[in-house]
Amino acid sequence: MPLNAEFAAFLHAIPRPVLTGHPADVRALSDDLPARPVTTPLPRVEDHTIPGPAEAPALPVRVYAPSNEPGLPVTVFFHGGGFCIGDLETHDAVARILAREAECVVVSVAYRLAPENPFPAAHEDAYAAYTWVRAHAAELGADPARVAVAGDSAGATLAGAVCLMVRDRGGVQPHFQLLWYPDTGVPTESRRRNTDDILLTPDSMAWFHTHYHGRIPEDQRLPYGAIGLNEDLSGLAPALVVVAGMDPLHDEGTAYAESLRASGVPTMLEDYADLGHGFVSFAEFIPPAAEAVQSSYAALRTAFEKP
């Protein structure tokens, strides 16, 4: 099946960073691009800092509330960008729409980036953010008993890893995990098949991997740096895994959903055959992407309704 024509035309028309050299230089170029207009105004959007892991810097976060109603559920959101690029601004629109459509407070986390902060810095930041939000949700006007995690691409990897870290460290599982096209660290056929993805090329995947994971042996990535290689996923939060048919990460996301189910985790899988990597970031502009994400929001709303 060919890539959706509307999606392809949009991606070819917008500026995209060239992923070469040092990630700091790529970030600087991205910072110079015009800011995306705010198309989803919300009654409360606030920037804060929260404690990071022990002996690490504080974490910037942005809190989005779809209303001033107290006791809303809350989703801790981790942005994509291969652990090397991306920030609160690049995913501001995603977080705003997620808050509005899922009817929850969203806490978007600016975790540390590589290569300045290689594995496991982003993972530990993600875990610290989740545990802080669970403990302090009421201060954000949210319900501490209904805390979910979500992310796209590398952010989905972090959301999935947080569930494993919480299980292994004796914490309370999230209410739900929403994983948009996660990188699970498993070599699959789709990585060899889908080499023409506009946003995620073989070269870019190698670039991301080198900067975040490249300083450690492969076997030291387990259990959290390659979540798809874990044989036991039992005891994790219910999940929705969303994949795109033209994405190099398609097969590993599908396999991860199957592994979750095999471990007894209630898991839904959604597969959008004619979309590619990153489609969630453009849902406000591309009707097929907007249609695809609606069921993600519905699944999160439904999960929050369950005790």
Image (cartoon, rainbow, N blue to C red):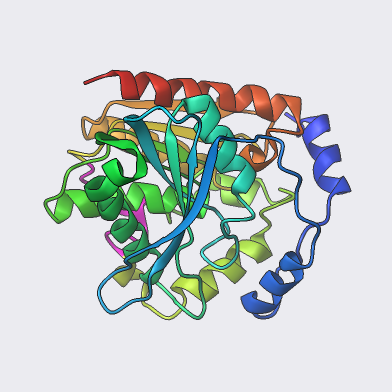
- Relative to 302, 291 lies left or right: right
Please name whichever residue, 218 or 19, is drawn nearer the observer in this view of the structure.
19
Q: Can you give x and y, in whole percent of width and height, for residue 90 in the image?
A: 64, 54
Residue at 50% across, 81% down: 116
Q: Can you give x and y, in whole percent of width and height, for residue 275 in the image?
A: 68, 34
The stretch drawn in magenta includes residue 225: yes
Residue at 71% across, 42% down: 38
Please name whichever residue, 66 or 84, is drawn nearer the observer in this view of the structure.
66
| Residue 182 visible to an observer of this rendering | yes
The total number of labels drawn is 0
Magenta residues (range): 222-233
Rendered position, 55 above or below 46: below
Please name whichever residue, 32 or 220, is drawn nearer the observer in this view of the structure.
32
Rendered position, 165 above or below 83: above
Main SS of residues in magenta: loop
Q: Can you give x and y, in whole percent of width and height, for residue 212 in the image?
A: 48, 72
Residue at 53% across, 49% down: 153
Residue at 22% across, 49% down: 135
- Relative to 205, 3 lies left or right: right
The N terminus lies in quadrant? top right
- Relative to 66, 304 lies left or right: left
The C terminus lies in quadrant? top left
